[in-house]
Amino acid sequence: MFSFKPIKESQKESCCATTSESCSTESHDCCSPQPKGKAACPLCGKAAKGVLVKTLEHLLTDDTKAKLDTLEGFHYCKTPTCEAVYFRGNEVLKQDALTVTVGLKEGASPATVCYCFEWTKEKIKAEIEATGKTTALEDIKAEMENPGCSCEILNPSGQCCLGDVGKVVKELSK
């Protein structure tokens, strides 16, 4: 079995550490709590989980961040066919508001499913076509042990990717 181990700060350039003193300044407060519960996306109506401020701090464009009064209270819409990536009430942020492509959205290229260790749907598909199987899940689990992962700041959902990677592997293995 594996255990979650965040990447050490020296391994990934990040302002978000495990101590609150390094990530709570006047200009940067990435340790605000995640919104509790789920909210319905204003575009597709599907339930969506809240997202951490530090996720948005790292993945939104500077222009987008400058237009927002706060990064608190946003939710992540994982519906592949929905244009919304993040929303707060009726305020919607789409793909162009992010510095990364949201791989689980329909038409995404590359379709990244693991942002920490650069696994894409395309890479998984190529491995399955070449060998009849993929080592994606095993590789990610091993990498989570050493050097660790940074899902909270690299993955647009702010969550661990293993569930999404597993779904992609199952889908592409059919």
Image (cartoon, helix red, strand yellow):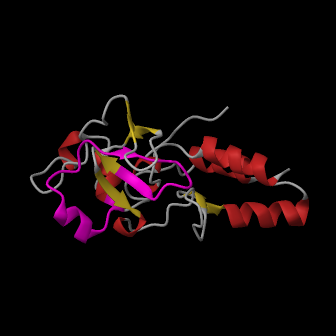
Most foreground residue, 73 or 54: 73
At x 30%, y 68%, the residue is 61
Farthest residue to the left: give it: 26
Residue 20 locus on image (x, y percent): 22, 40
- Determine which quarter of the picture holds residue 21: top left
Q: Is residue 108 above or below residue 72?
A: below
In the rendered image, the quadrant that contains the N terminus is top right
* Residue 169 position in % (x across, y down): 75, 50
Residue 85 within the magenta-colored segment of the rendering: yes
Magenta highlight range:
58-86
Task: Tell which residue pokes out farthest to the top in this image.
Answer: 37
Is residue 14 visible to us here? no
Q: Residue 145 occupies which quadrant of the picture? A: top right
Q: Write the residue at 42% across / 60% down.
A: 12
From the viewer's perspective, tell me whether residue 102 is left or right of residue 168.
left
Number of marks in the rendered image: 0
- Asked if residue 70 lies in the magenta stretch, the reply is yes
| Residue 118 x, y percent position in the rendering | 59, 63
The residue shown at (59%, 71%) is 109
Q: Nearer the viewer, residue 33 or 116?
A: 33
Q: Tell whether 7 sits left or right of 80.
A: left
Residue 102 seen in this snapshot: yes
For the point 72% across and 65% down, which residue is it?
123
Please tell me which residue lies in front, 3 or 93: 93
**Could you say where residue 160 lies in the image, as x and y percent from the top left?**
52, 43
Q: Is residue 22 left or right of residue 81?
A: left
